[in-house]
Amino acid sequence: MANWTSGILTNRGRDLQLKVEAGEKLKMTRFKLGDGMEATAEVADLNDLMGAKIAFGITGIERLGTLCKFTGVVTSTSVSAGFRAREWGLFAEDPDLGEILYMIALDDRPDYIAAQDAVLNSTITYALNVDISQASKIEPVIDPQGLVTTEILEKAAGLVKRNTGYSLNDKAFDIQLSAHPSWRLVCTKAGTTSGVLLNLHGAKLGDTYTDGTAEWTVKDAYEAAVDAHNKASDAHADIRRILDDKAPIESPALTGTPTAPTASAGTRSDQIATTNFVAAAITALVNSSPAALDTLQELAKAIGNDPNFATTILNKLSEKVSKSGDTMSGDLNLSKALNLTGGVTSAGFWAGQKDTGDPISAQDANLVIGSWFGIAFRDMCNNQVSCGIDARTGNYLTNGKVIAKGGIEGRLIGKADSAGHSDTSGRADNANMLGGQSLSDILGKINAQNTGGIVASSITQNGWVRFANGLIVQWGTIDGLSSVNKVYAFPIEFPTQAFTVMGASISYEYGVALRTFSRAQFTASWWPDEFGSTPQNGHLVQFIAIGH
C-alpha cells in the first residue's frame, strides 16, 4: 500500500515561492510519476524526477484557506510499461526559468502502475495538498485529458459495449459481475453485440451467453488469460525462446561474457576457474621473474631445450676441478691472468723432477712460467708492485735490496753516475757495501791517487770538490737577503754532515749571518748597522761551506 511522504519543495520551488509572495502568480502545470529511488537529501537540487515514467495533467484544484489541493488522474491505458510509483512531482511555471520541478513526494511502499496491455486496467486519482500563503494567486493549468469521463471509465474498466464488434478471446466486464471483481466475459465466438443489455443475474463461471452475433463465456480473468495463452498458436513460444537462450547443464556452450565467483588462491576443486583466478595463479607462478624468463618457452630456451638438464649439468660439473682440491690429467692453459691472493704452496714434487742442467740453456725446468711481457710480485699489505722480472730481457727489478747470501757470480755492471766517470761500460754503484765501505768511495780513493786527493768535483760558479778522505768543500754566490733568515740550497747535499758555512757581501759593508740548516741547505740574513737598518735586495753574497 502506498505511503507517500509530505510534499518537499525543491530549491527552485522555494525560489518561486518567494517570487509569488512578492506578487508573482503561481502557475501549476502538470504532474509526473516515476520509479526513481532518490534519497530525501537529494530532492532539493532536482529539476525533474530521477526516473520519470509518465506525465499527466492537473484535473482540478480546491482552495481551503492557505491549503490548495491539486488533483490528477492516471489510467493504465496510457502506460507503455508497468512500473513502481516511487516518486511523484508537481511542476510549475517560473517567470524567469520556465517550467520547474516545484515539489516532490516519495513513497517507500510504492503501488504498481500496470501497463496498457495488462489483464486488468486501472485508474488512479492522485491529490496533492500544498500549503501556500498566497493561495489566491495560484493559476492551475487544467488538462481536459486528465478529466475522468464515462468513456474513460468504460475503457479503463473494459466494460462491454453495445453494437460493437469483438474478436475471439476479447475480454470485457459488466457491472452485473461486480460481486466478482476478477470475473470477465470472454468472447468465445466473434461477432457484434446487440443493442440490448445482457441479463447476467445468477451467472456462474463457465456460463455462456449469446449477445447479438457474438458469444460470451464467464471466466476468471486470470484463468482466461492463461487459457488464451495456452490455446494460442505460439503458446509457450516465449518460454521456448527463454529456454533456447539458456545453456544445457551438461557440456554448456556459453557465449558472450559469462561470469562466476573467483575462487581463493590455492583452491583445488571442481569450481569454475575464472580469468581472475587464472591470472592470479600465473602471477604467483611467475613471481616477479625477469621479463626474459617469465614464460615456459623462455625457460626452455634458457636451458637449451634440454629435457635432461639436471643430468647434463651434473655430468659437466664432474669434469671440473674441485675447489677443495683435485688432480688434473692434462695441461692447465690460462688465457687470462691467474690471481693467487692466498699464495702458492707445494705439497710434493713432480714425479719426473729435473734436478740438473741449466734451465735457460736447456729451455726446460720443473716449473716454467710463461709471460708475454713480465712477471710482477704485488705487496698486498701496501697494495703495490715491489719487484718483477722482465720476461724478454731477463732484467730483475726491485724496490728493495738484492741480498745474495751465497755471493755474486759474474760482473757487476750498471750505468755511469753523475760524477762524470769515463767508465761507460758502467759500475755497480748500487751495490751496498764492500769490506764495510762504499764501492763508490773505494773507486774514488783509487782515482784520487792520480788527482791529488780529489775524487770528484764541479768547478763552476756554484761548485764543489770531494776529497778521498770524504771531506767536501762547496762555494757559490747568493742574492735576495733580508733581515729575516732565508733558506738556500748547497750545490750538492753533504752525505754525512755540513760542518760550517761562512760568507761576506761582495759590494756592501753590512755583515752577513750564515748558518747550516741541514745537510742540503743553509740560512742567510743581513746584520743591521748601528742605526738598525739593513740593505735592500740586489747585493750579492759569496759563501763557502765545509762538510763530509
Image (cartoon, rainbow, N blue to C red):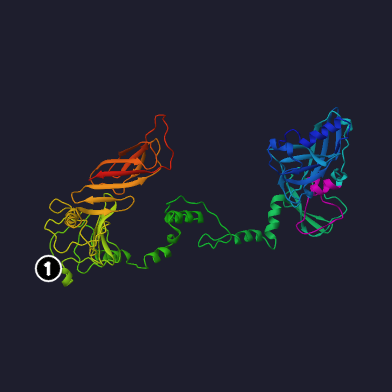
Q: Which residue is mark 1?
A: 354
Q: Is residue 412 above or below residue 540?
A: below
* Amino acid type of the residue that numbered disc 1 sits on in the rendered structure: Lys
- Occupied quadrant, residue 130: top right
Residue in view at x 15 percent, y 51 percent:
437
Q: Is residue 106 visible?
A: no
Instruction: Locate residue 18, reporting x and y percent.
Output: 83, 31
Q: Is residue 42 visible?
A: yes
Q: Is residue 222 above or below residue 64?
A: below
Farthest residue in the bottom direction? 362
SS label for mark 1: loop
Query: Which residues lie in the magenta part?
Result: 151-176
Instruction: Locate residue 87, reporting x and y percent.
Output: 73, 40
- Occupied quadrant, residue 34: top right
Residue in view at x 57 percent, y 58 percent:
257
Image quadrant occupied by the C terminus: top left
Give the left or right position of residue 222, taking residue 481 as reference.
Answer: right
